[in-house]
Amino acid sequence: MKFIIGKKIEMTSVFGHSGRMIAATRIKVNPNFVSQIKTKEKEGYEAVQLAFDKNKKIKKPQKGHLGKIGSYGVLKEFRVDKSSDFKVGQEVNASIFETGEIVNIMGFSKGKGFQGVVKRHGFKGAPATHGTKDQLRMPGSIGPTGPAHVFKGTRMPGRMGHDQVTVRNLEIIKVNKKSNEIFVKGAVPGPRHQILKIVATGNKNEKNASDFDSPTEANKGQEETNDKKKDNKAENKSTSTKASTNKKEEKTKEKPQKDSKEKKEK
């Protein structure tokens, strides 16, 4: 099972080998470290806790919990089938993923603050004419006075956004192992610098993987032939330029000889 903690950087465009452009999200996945392993004997379930995002300003209990791993500000837990496959201090980085893999990404949506019923629930609002005054975006009646209380679930104004959202079946388009970045097709919940949990489903899209993956042996062979053709064209150009320069030099040499002959005849 593959999983990692990442940070949303921005949305960008990625071009495949065929020239196809896809909107993608760039996610920074700096090396994660296993900070705790939970077992059925102790905690009652199998899970692995990862540490992410180095931060010196953490509390002493957290420093004691992390121990020799270091000071990290983000700790996330992932359920696994066998926690015995992991060790405390083990590193998890972007190299575990491949292009074409399908992942589920969990984060928190953008917070929009306290909003009214029109924006929060999509209410139509009151008519703008025929005596309406200061009631255009009001919620209206919320029920009779008989029960003497507000029913649970009544749609009313309140805080909107910043909810936990999981976007499923997103495809990894590109993996940059040097900079520890992965590019995911489509949008991801949350604003920039949002902490994300990334879990692989075990499925893979082979069609797009061939388009966005690093060049295969066949592609490399084609690239080599293209390079040879380019070299041959460059050589032909150089030889043609040399030949033209030689012809010009010969013409310039012939001209003074003709002039000297004409002077002698005169």
Image (tube, grey):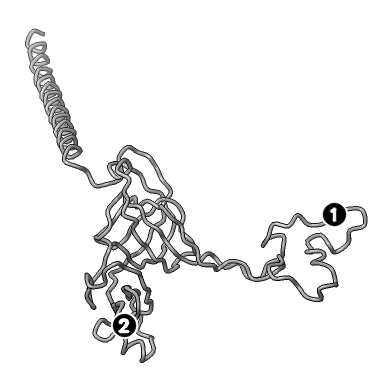
219 on left or right of 63: left
Q: Are marks 1 and 2 in contact (CB under 8 Å)?
A: no
Residue drawn 28% across the image and 77% down it? 37
* Location of residue 30 in the rendering, given as x and y in whole percent from the top left corner: 30, 68
State the residue lying farthest toward the top: 265
Residue drawn 44% across the image and 64% down it? 106
Q: Which of marks 1 and 2 is nearer the N terminus?
A: 2
- Neighbor class of circle 1 (other Cα within 10 Å; few <14, some 14-19, many 20+) is few
State the residue lying farthest toward the right: 131
Q: Mark 2 points at which residue?
A: 42
Question: Mark 2 belongs to which amino acid?
Answer: Lys
Residue nearest the viewer, comparing 161 with 10: 161
Question: Mark 1 belongs to which amino acid?
Answer: Ala
Where's the C terminus, which quadrant?
A: top left
68 on left or right of 199: left
* Location of residue 126 in the rendering, given as x and y in whole percent from the top left corner: 82, 56
Where's the N terminus, which quadrant?
A: bottom left
Residue drawn 54% across the image and 65% down it? 110
* Residue 128 - label: 1
Residue drawn 27% across the image and 74% down it? 33
The span from disc 1 to disc 2 (Cα, nearest Å) is 63 Å
164 on left or right of 263: right
Identify the element where label 2 is drawn.
Answer: loop
Q: Nearer the viewer, mark 1 or mark 2?
A: 2
- Neighbor class of circle 2 (other Cα within 10 Å; few <14, some 14-19, many 20+) is few
